[in-house]
Amino acid sequence: MYASEYWNDRYVREDTPWDTGEPVPPLHRIISGLNQRDIRILIPGAGRGYEAILLRSMGFQNVYVCDWAEQALDALRQKDMDFPEDHLLCGDFFALELQVDLILEHTFFCAIPRSMRIPYVQKAHQLLNSGGAIAGLLFSREFEAPGPPFGGSEEEYRSLFSPHFAIRELTPALDSIAPRLGSELQFRFEKRGV
């Protein structure tokens, strides 16, 4: 698996083509639809934390970000100097020890090797409180280059997530940014069981 040095170096070199400089429209819409300001939210692979900053500006205080790259989290600190330090988790998503109500997914799932997809589903299930959900965007295409990013399909996601999650939404994202238009699925999966 790609380690922290790999991702930190990408940020140091400004080799971050996934970074749009702001929350992408589908995520902005998902965030705008959240009503309970006291929920605990985790954003894995948060990068420079645009979604976290938006959430905090809307009154969400229980926002946690996780990323391998200290350089990315430093950029978040500079944009939101009041971001709680104990909510900035620099390290391995798979080693996290916390409970949240919502996981916002954007570019993390596609950055991990395919061999880590089942462990990702299991870890997401473990991190979520009863009734919790994971929501965001997944690629609905394959890539010619070896990756990351790694692509996928609706059928694969249904197969992967269904044992642990109820599929509430898995539809084409109609307002993706231009380079990804027609290549993303918007989703919401709710945790099964306790």
Image: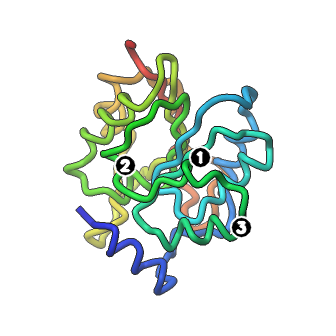
- The residue closer to the viewer here, 181 or 64, is 64
Element class at badge 1: loop
* Residue at the spot of label 1: 173
Which circle, 3 or 1, is nearer the viewer? 3
- The residue closer to the viewer here, 61 or 133, is 61
Write down the quadrant of residue 98 in the picture.
top left
- Nearest to N terminus: mark 3 or mark 1: 3
Which circle, 1 or 2, is nearer the viewer? 2
* Residue 3 screen position, x and y as percent: 28, 67
Of all residues, the one furthest to the left in this rendering is 115
* Residue at the spot of label 2: 93
Q: Amino acid at mark 3?
A: Lys
* Residue 170 screen position, x and y as percent: 50, 34
* Residue 144 screen position, x and y as percent: 30, 70
Q: Amino acid at mark 1?
A: Ala
One can see residue 82 in this view = yes
* Residue at the spot of label 3: 79
Element class at badge 2: helix
Q: Residue at x 79, y 40 (%)?
A: 59
Does residue 13 lie above or below 150 as drawn?
below
Element class at badge 3: helix
Say whether residue 100 is left or right of residue 32.
left
* Residue 1 screen position, x and y as percent: 23, 61
Q: Residue at x 54, y 49 (%)?
A: 86
